[in-house]
Image (cartoon, helix red, strand yellow):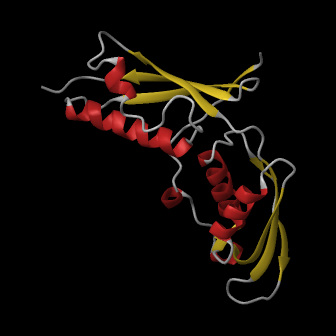
């Protein structure tokens, strides 16, 4: 069995926080083309429908595609460099944009465990696990993990731990196409 550790930060990248490039680097996507040997056509088409017609910086569009793939369980997906065919030279030029996508395996959640320190845990493992809307065996979604991390933080804050820190540590098992997630929780100091 090959286990691949990965450095990832879940829930921190949202569309609202993606940086916008200078307007000179924006393109209106006339036609979005995704070329892939391993992404099912139905999922490829869904991504195209989501972004075709919009106006994006190339880096921003590539990141949005990666985010969508990670949301659908393709946690280690790669999106290549954009190939742009510019159609006109208006303020935001229309262009046909092609990306090569290597989706890789579609991962499922193996399990989530918690390491809480220092001292005794304020909450049981069952209470901590209940903050995550994803069940063991479901398609691994960065969005659901991010939502769970936010709920976990809110749980600690509601108990007076304003400086709680959580660090997700995923381990990808390529043989079983699963992700085991260990979340280190440092509750910080309890305010009186």
**In this rendering, does residue 162 appear at all?**
no
What's the residue at 30%, 23% (across, down)?
188
Looking at this view, name the residue that lies furthest to the top. Answer: 119
Side (left or right) of 104 relative to 112 = right
Between 35 and 4, the one lying in front of the other is 35
What's the residue at 72%, 24% (across, down)?
176
Quadrant assignment, res 148: top left
Between 12 and 173, the one lying in front of the other is 173
8 lies above or below 182: below
The percent coordinates of residue 87 (x first, y second) are: 82, 85
**In this rendering, does residue 81 appear at all?**
yes
Quarter that holds the N terminus: top right
Side (left or right) of 40 relative to 136 = right
39 lies above or below 127: below
The percent coordinates of residue 37 (x first, y second) are: 87, 50
What's the residue at 53%, 39% (across, down)?
10
Quarter that holds the C terminus: top left
55 lies above or below 82: below
């Amino acid at each position: 069995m090959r286990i691949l550790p990965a450095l990832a930060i879940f829930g921190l990248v949202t569309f609202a926080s993606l940086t916008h490039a200078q307007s000179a680097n924006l393109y209106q996507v006339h036609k979005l083309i995704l070329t892939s040997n391993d992404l099912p056509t139905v999922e490829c088409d869904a991504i195209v429908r989501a972004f075709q017609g919009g106006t994006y910086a190339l880096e921003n569009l590539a990141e949005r595609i990666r985010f969508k793939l990670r949301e659908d369980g393709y946690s280690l997906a790669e999106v290549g460099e954009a190939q742009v065919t510019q159609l006109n030279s208006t303020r935001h030029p229309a262009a046909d944009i092609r990306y090569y996508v290597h989706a890789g395996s579609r991962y499922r959640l193996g399990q989530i465990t918690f390491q809480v320190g220092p001292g005794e845990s304020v909450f049981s493992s069952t209470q901590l696990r209940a903050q995550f809307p994803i069940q063991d065996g479901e398609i691994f979604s960065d969005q659901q993990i991010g939502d769970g991390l936010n709920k976990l933080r809110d749980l600690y804050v509601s108990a007076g731990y304003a400086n709680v820190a959580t660090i997700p540590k995923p381990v990808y098992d390529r043989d079983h196409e699963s992700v085991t997630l260990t979340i280190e929780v440092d509750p910080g100091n309890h305010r009186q």
